[in-house]
Amino acid sequence: VAFRAVLAAIRLDMFETLASGALNTAELAQHLNADARGVQRLIEALMPLGYIKRQGDRYANTSMTNKWLLRSSPMSFAPYFRYWGAIIPKLMDDLEDSIRQGRAPRNLYEWLEHEPEVSRDFQEALIALANFALGDVIGKLPLPDSAQRLLDVGGGHAMYSVALCQKYAKLRATVFDSPQAL
């Protein structure tokens, strides 16, 4: 339920709207082109989860929401919510059959090739994850200073390869991935 409430707020652009400043329920509903009662119920679901806070008779994003869910944040995980919001009903509706048969009914990556919006969200989510973990990942990948070549299979956004090439002056990378990822 919590996931679905956050996904609804993302899809309605609630967090983006509140990024400009606190609004009361009626103002927020008007900006979202939504019913005020429905907006109030969503607010009431998001407040105890820590995504929205009350400021008098107005509502605003929490610092957590601003850091992790706004498009302007380099570490926005909103694309992950949109990605999973598409994956769950379309690819996991028959999870029980998949478990019985011991294999997925569809190949995720083949499916993504035909779903450009979901693929874009997936790639944006991977970029956010890389922004979040880049320093830690690069710090745990010691290479000899003499390293000259790197093959990054499934490297998509190439952020790890770029960071490694910056760290090791002689290193050159080749990134291999699907066209949509690249």
Image (spheres, rainbow, N blue to C red):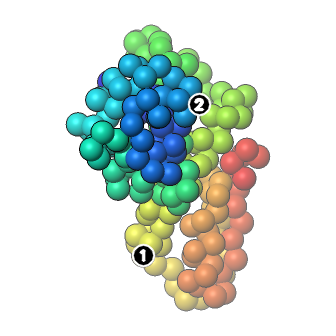
Q: Position of residue 162 (x, y in %)?
A: 63, 72
| Rendered residue at 28%/29% (across/down) | 44
**Residue 51 higher or lower than 129, as above or below:** above
* Residue 30 visible in the snapshot: yes
User: Which quadrant does the N terminus fall into?
Assistant: top left
Q: Give the labeled residue for mark 1.
A: 139
| Rendered residue at 48%/67% (across/down) | 134
Q: Position of residue 158 (x, y in %)?
A: 64, 62
Q: Position of residue 156 (x, y in %)?
A: 65, 54
What residue type is disc 2 on? Leu
Please tell me which of labels 1 and 2 falls first in the chain.
2
**Residue 156 higher or lower than 4, as above or below:** below
Q: Is residue 110 left or right of residue 8?
A: right
Q: Give the labeled residue for mark 2.
A: 108
Residue found at the very far left of the displayed protein: 48
Q: Which corner quadrant of the image does residue 102 belong to?
A: top left
Mark 1: which secondary structure?
Answer: helix
Q: Is residue 139 left or right of residue 176?
A: left
What residue type is disc 1 on? Gly
| Label 1 – label 2 distance at C-alpha | 31 Å
